[in-house]
Amino acid sequence: MLVSAMGVLVAYKALSRWGVELRWKRKEALFNFVDSFLDTPGAQNAMMMLHTKSREVPLWDKGTPEDRWVRVTWDDVSAAFTPNRERELPVEPFDTAIRDCFGDFFGRLTRLQLMREEDILQQKHIDFIMKHWKDVFSRDFDCPHMRNIRVFLHTHQYDRIVKLFRSVGFDLEKQIETDMTQLFSEVGE
């Protein structure tokens, strides 16, 4: 009987220690993710493009600063995500560079959703990280660049990003049908 009680006590302590370690691992994952969210130039550039209607962005990987920095506007972002009649996106280097930056940013958001799905981060941590991005995406909800980004996320099946935003109370697809109608009427479809 004493052996059984000792076994239960040891198992309880081990389980308790495992719970504490799990909480610390979640906190560590949260801090590492937040610290590294904008570590890449592409994610940084996308953030700059989302925050300002018109600004200089280090879009190119060239030697001198005057060759790297280019003025990018929300109209440029909108154009980079606007398909032609054949539903193909522009292939000009400027447009491709803009989309590449957003591709990096979308990868970060997808990673956050994966961490949510695997219970590495709890919803309260996701809410903390996504508060800012929810504010940014909802602030300019009716702007053409955001509409085109939403259509891009939908048509290119970035379902995890859509789920991520939905988990924090912001439905990117709530007006996707209207967005697509507007966008494709502009391109002549």
Image (cartoon, grey):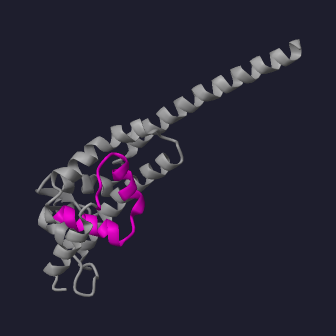
Rendered-image quadrant of the N terminus? top right
Q: Is residue 151 above or below residue 39?
A: below
| Magenta span includes 153 | yes
Q: Position of residue 147 (x, y in %)?
A: 20, 65
Residue lying farthest top?
2
Q: Is residue 182 above or below residue 108?
A: below
Q: Position of residue 36 (x, y in %)?
A: 39, 44
Q: Which residue is at the front of the view, 101 or 29?
A: 29
Q: Which residues are magenta?
A: 145-173
Figure quadrant of residue 146? bottom left
Q: Position of residue 50 (x, y in %)?
A: 20, 55
Q: Which residue is at the front of the view, 185 or 145?
A: 185
Rendered-image quadrant of the C terminus? bottom left
> Which residue sits at x=47%, y=40%?
121
Q: Is residue 88 left or right of residue 8?
A: left
Q: Which residue is at the front of the view, 178 or 78?
A: 178
| Magenta span includes 54 | no
Q: Is residue 40 left or right of residue 86?
A: right
Q: Is residue 9 left or right of residue 83?
A: right
> Which residue sits at x=26%, y=57%?
46
> Which residue sits at x=15%, y=55%?
140
Q: Is residue 161 visible?
A: yes
> Which residue sits at x=58%, y=25%?
20
Q: Is residue 98 visible?
A: no
Our reading of the magenta stretch's main secondary structure is: helix
Q: Position of residue 22 (x, y in %)?
A: 57, 32
